[in-house]
Image (tube, grey):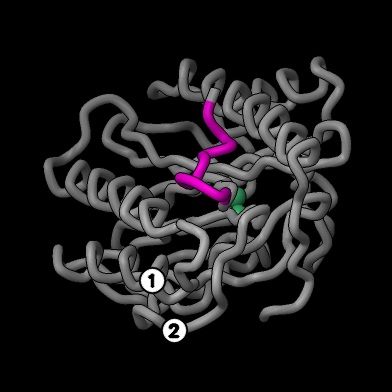
Amino acid sequence: MERNIVIKDKKELDLMRAAGRLNARALAAVREIIRPGVTTADLDAVAEEVITKNGAVPIFKGYPGPYPYPGTLTISINEELVHGIPGKRKLKEGDIVSIDCGTKLDGFVGDSAFTIGVGEISTDAQKLLDTTEQSLYEGISKMWAGNRVGDVASAIQQYVEQRGYLLTRVYTGHGVGRKMHEGPQVPNYGTPGRGLVLRPGMTIAIEPMVLVGTDKTRVLPDKWTVVSADGSLTAHYEHTIAVTEGEPIILTLA
Ligand code: MG
Ligand code: MG
């Protein structure tokens, strides 16, 4: 878990920032066309165009797994927590859709995700989205050098669980850099004061994955899509963050 940690210097952080910014632009382009009737393949195509037209690579595509991942995005609707594969499915009014994107530009990766409602969504769904998004920022607020992974993880956990929701124990945040997955792992649950000490130059994707009815998940027969075991709603937000000498910097903003 504490292996494969790569400290980035100033120049490398600038490159990470550029990759993160382009990733954010791809996600923004997707957000703009989300509406009932749009297929998930349409969303995927928009993100891929933004990334490739800017000389970058959609890093999820071909990612090793049960079979090479076929999309630029993972698109996960309602009970789908993460890793949903884009295709012919059309978004419907009232769906909540999680979009996760990874971009490799000039050798470095930006990784970020958000969940959004399609048209009008229920009050319950909106509360799930708001809680998940805010929990990400609660975690980021703890990403000061000298703090520990457990400080970040427990901030997310406490914010989410105090509001009656659950977090996956299976999927975690992770270091990110030249590769999409580096050390350290950052779970969405933990104990303050425990775990690896954060150091300047660490770059970490923080990604709360929140469930309503159970923290148990299963993988669909497509071998990628992860759903809540009870079919209840889920949400996912993610940013790539740099730990610095000062305040944490979000690298995946436009
Ligand atoms: Mg991601
Ligand atoms: Mg990630």
Principal secondary structure, stretch drawn in magenta: loop
Q: Is residue 48 above or below residue 176?
A: above
Ligand 2 within 8 Å of disc 1? The answer is no
Direction from residue 137 to residue 237 in the image, left or right? right
Direction from residue 168 to residue 99 in the image, left or right? right
Q: Mark 1 points at which residue?
A: 151
- Residue 65 in the magenta stretch? The answer is no
Looking at the image, which residue is at 79% across and 41% down?
12
**Region of the chain picked out in magenta, as a range:** 244-253
Q: In which quarter of the image is residue 179?
A: bottom right
x and y, in percent, of residue 220 in the image: 57, 67
Looking at the image, which residue is at 33% across and 64% down?
156
x and y, in percent, of residue 38 in the image: 50, 23
- Residue 248 in the magenta stretch? The answer is yes
Question: Which element type, helix, strand or loop, lies under badge 2?
Answer: loop
x and y, in percent, of residue 17 in the image: 67, 33
Q: Name the residue under label 2.
A: 194
Direction from residue 107 to residue 240 in the image, left or right? left
Q: What residue type is labelled 2?
A: Arg
Q: Nearer the viewer, residue 249 or 159?
A: 249
Looking at the image, which residue is at 56% across and 18% down?
29
> Quick check: which quadrant has ligand 2?
bottom right
Q: How many labels does the image show?
A: 2
On the rendered image, what quadrant is the N terminus found in? bottom right
- CB within 8 Å, label 2 to label 1: no
Q: Which of 194 and 205 is in front in this view?
A: 194
